[in-house]
Image (tube, rainbow, N blue to C red):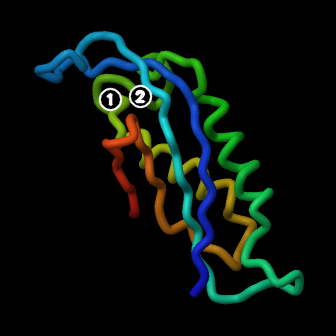
Amino acid sequence: MYRLTVKGSFSAAHRLPDHPSPCSRLHGHNWEVAVTVIGEELGPDGMLLDFAVLKQILREVLAKLDHQYLNELPPFGKEFPPTAENLARYIYHEVAARLASYSAVTLQEVRVGESPSAWVVYTP
């Protein structure tokens, strides 16, 4: 089994209105994201998936979030607040949709960090 991981980042603001802490106020993070795919078979080029392909997919997904107020972006809102957990799930499904044509790989997990000491990993 091969595991391939790429990283990306974006800056965005959010607030968690019902959270009993300063996080209920508007604030921002420099979010760090890592995406990992797995697979068993290498292509004729000796790669599971070209790093450049996965980096481009991740850039496309993160571009929609970069320098945004996440609470105002679909699908986020009262029922789906822009927590690190929900961001990881959202990014996972966005990346998975773009990877659908690459049958040799399976998206394993998405890691989202809101700081160097706090992150979440989403696996379905």
Dividing the picture into quadrants, the one containing residue 24 is top left
Residue 64 in the figure: left or right of residue 71: right
Mark 2 in CB contact with mark 1 (< 8 angstroms):
yes
Give the Cα separation between the discs numbered 2 and 1.
5 Å
x then y, percent, for residue 80: 33, 33
**69 in relation to 121, above or below:** above
Q: Secondary structure at mark 2?
A: loop
Dividing the picture into quadrants, the one containing residue 122 is bottom left
| 23 vs 117, nearest the viewer | 117
- Please tell me which residue is depicted at 35% across the width and 46% down the height of the picture: 119
Q: Quick one: label 2 or label 1, which is nearer the N terminus?
A: 2
Mark linked to residue 76: 2
Residue placed farthest to the right in the image?
45
- Please tell me which residue is depicted at 75% across the width and 71% down the height of the picture: 49
Residue 124 in the figure: left or right of residue 48: left
x then y, percent, for residue 66: 60, 26
x then y, percent, for residue 97: 63, 55
| 82 vs 74, nearest the viewer | 82
**1 in relation to 100, above or below:** below
Disc 1 residue crowd, few under 14, some 14–19, many 20+, Cα 10 Å: some
Give, as a three-letter code, the residue at label 1.
Answer: Pro
For the C terminus, the image quarter is bottom left
Residue position marked by numbered label 1 in the rendering = 81
Disc 2 residue crowd, few under 14, some 14–19, many 20+, Cα 10 Å: some
Q: Secondary structure at mark 1?
A: loop
